[in-house]
Amino acid sequence: MPPLNPDLQNRLILSLFCVLISMLLLYFWYLSLPKLKANQRDGSGLFYLGLSYLLYATLGLVSVFQPLPVTLLIVSGLIGFALLSSLPFFSLGTHQIDRIVTHPRWRNGVKYAGFAWVILASLISEWAGVYMLDTVLTVVTLSCLGFFIVRYFWQRQLRFIAVIAAGYFATFILLQIWQPGSLSEGKFTHLNTLVLGPALVLSVISLAYTFNWLNELDFYELSNIWVAPPSAPQAAHTAYAPLTQPGHRSDWLEKMAKDEIETVIEEMIILRKHRHENLEDLLNLASRNTRNNTHYLKDLIKYEDYQLNRNKIAHALTQMVKEAAH
């Protein structure tokens, strides 16, 4: 085998980095399995995200050996479908689009579409239009993925990361749609610039998201101290349904006026868990309340100090109630 030119050597290196990213994401998915089961959550999207990086590596590695164009088309399309299958991992569960990507029909539909792509690319790989289909699939995939990731960071008050992520996805999408003259031969010739390099940047954003997701998963597990997990989906719906009524915020304020702090905390946790929202600030407040109650029961603090701490907790909780989304 003749020596590889520098471009192909770099492609091998980038592909190996994609393998490492895949192993890391799959490792995090494996570690999360017990917590996912305990919290009745689905983390299969993280598995597909890891699989997509394995496919990125496959695309880079096989391209070194000058395969048939149909092989590159098939792998490129499968990357898109793997990323579409990962979208439930990025869902916040608060809007209609979240319910779409977490519905079993979405998952099954993406899988069937993946099989159809393999057959289609195999049959019409000589048709120039199939490359356009591959580009359309890539743009749609990146647009969906970008929407979910940017929305997550924005709603978690990580605004700077959200802006950086938005800029990245806009650049990646533009590279797929419009290629400079020197890159006019297409992404399969310039994989390093148009595919593998941007994929490694995406890995940084994906890992940042994954670390935040794992941290939130710990808080979901901690929330079971306050709210026992329901024994059945119907029980979960029964507990959640009253909290979705238009007047639930005013009900909380009335309970706060009656010093029913623990009840409000529990109901807010139920609501946030059902919507897959961040629990960190609420559970920190719950911990402060528990610690204050425990210290008072053990006569470690005076009643005046206990009441002062409780008033501070009530004030912070009232602010959360006023800011809570319906």
Image: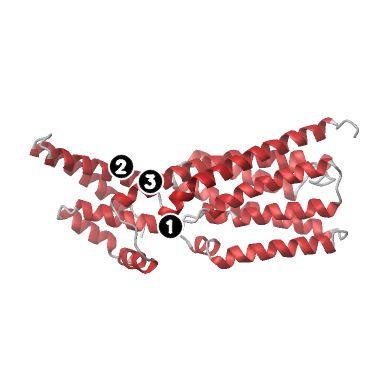
Q: Residues within 10 Å of mark 3 (few under 14, many from 20)?
A: some
Residue positioned 58% across, 54% down in the render: 86
Q: Nearer the viewer, mark 3 or mark 2?
A: 3
Tell me the amino acid under the disc marked 1.
Gln
- Report the residue at 28% width, 62% height from top: 248
First in sequence: mark 3 vs mark 1: 1
Left or right, 256 with respect to 171, comes to left
Disc 3 designates what residue?
A: 219
Residue 176 visible in image: yes
**Residue 155 has which mark?**
none
Mark 3 to mark 2 CA distance (whole Å) = 10 Å
Give the side of residue 147 with respect to residue 74, left or right: left
Q: Residues within 10 Å of mark 1 (few under 14, many from 20)?
A: few
Q: Which quadrant holds residue 200?
A: top right
Q: Position of residue 23 (x, y in %)?
A: 61, 41
Residue 298 position in % (x across, y down): 12, 38
Q: CA distance from mark 3 to mark 1?
A: 14 Å
Q: Nearer the viewer, mark 1 or mark 2?
A: 1
Query: How far separated are the C-alphas under marks 1 and 2?
Result: 22 Å
* Residue placed most toward the observer, 255 or 250: 255
Label 2: which residue?
284
Q: What is the number of the mark on residue 40?
A: 1
Mark yes or no: residue 206 visible.
Answer: no
Q: Residue furthest right?
A: 2
Q: Are marks 3 and 2 in contact (CB under 8 Å)?
A: no
- Residue 115 sits above or below residue 190 on the image: below
Neighbour tally class for label 2: few under 14, some 14-19, many 20 plus, Cα within 10 Å: few
